Image: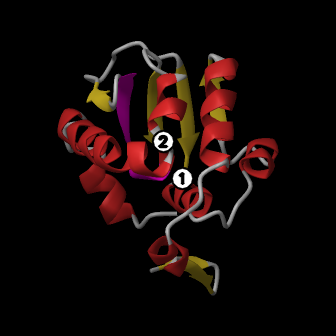
């Protein structure tokens, strides 16, 4: 769980600038990590990531070879909701999405087909070596 001060600040920030940063970051790295062909299968789909304990979210649409940020309130195909540490654990492959889902720590709402397609695509990704440096220590995720 994030400290109350972090939540207080993050929940008051405008949502669109982080969505732009997230979309630009994904546009730079996703084609290299996931592959252009895999991304093409999700073209036109819209996703929202809600970081519950930060009180914030970002949304984006997958366009040809890039991610497009969406404004808050824009309808999306699927929404993923979890705490920040659970998203980090998922990204570092320290947690299984199915386990988090059944433990009610990961909520998936909307088009389950799109959600499963994205999950399966991410499961097939080979993580870079530098990313495997994320480890858990005394119940806390550290870098």
Label ID, residue 116 = none
Please give left or right for residue 95 compared with residue 43 in the image.
Answer: right
Q: Nearer the viewer, mark 1 or mark 2?
A: 2
The x and y percentages for residue 39 are 48, 31
Towards the viewer: 72 or 45: 45
Q: Position of residue 83 (x, y in %)?
A: 54, 53
Magenta: main secondary structure equals: strand
Distance from disc 1 to disc 2, alpha carbons, whole Å, reads 27 Å
* Residue 131 part of the magenta segment: no
Q: Secondary structure at mark 2?
A: loop
Q: Residue at x 19, y 37 (%)?
A: 14
The answer to whether 132 appears left or right of 27 in the picture is: right
- Alpha-carbon neighbours of circle 2 within 10 Å: few (<14), some, or many (≥20)? some
Q: Which secondary structure lies at badge 1?
A: loop
Up the image or down, 42 lies above or below 107; here it is: above
Who's the residue at 70% across and 61% down the image? Answer: 95
Q: Is residue 54 magenta?
A: yes
Q: Nearer the viewer, residue 116 or 104?
A: 116
Disc nearer the start of the sequence (1/2): 2
Residue occupying the point 79% across, 48% down: 103
State whether residue 133 is above or below residue 71: below
Question: In the rendered view, does 104 fall on the left or right side of 135?
Answer: right
Residue span colored magenta: 53-63
User: Which numbered dot is residue 35?
Assistant: 2
Image quadrant holding the C terminus, namely bottom left
Q: Is residue 139 above or below residue 78?
A: below
* Residue 17 drawn at (x, y percent): 17, 39
Q: Residues within 10 Å of mark 1 (few under 14, many from 20)?
A: some
Q: How is the image coloured?
A: secondary structure
- Residue under pointer 1: 83
């Amino acid at each position: 769980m994030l400290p109350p001060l972090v939540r207080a600040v993050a929940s008051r920030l405008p949502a669109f600038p982080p969505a732009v940063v997230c979309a630009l970051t994904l546009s730079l790295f996703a084609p290299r990590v996931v592959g252009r062909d895999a991304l093409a299968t999700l073209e036109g789909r819209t996703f929202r990531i809600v970081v519950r304990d930060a009180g914030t979210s970002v949304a984006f649409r997958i366009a040809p070879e890039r991610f497009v940020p969406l404004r808050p309130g824009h309808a999306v195909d699927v929404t993923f909701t979890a705490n920040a540490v659970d998203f980090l654990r998922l990204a570092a492959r320290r947690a299984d999405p199915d386990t988090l889902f059944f433990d009610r720590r990961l909520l998936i709402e909307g088009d389950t087909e799109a959600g499963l397609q994205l999950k399966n695509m991410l499961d097939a990704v080979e993580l870079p070596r530098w990313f495997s440096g994320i480890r858990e220590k005394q119940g806390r995720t550290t870098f």
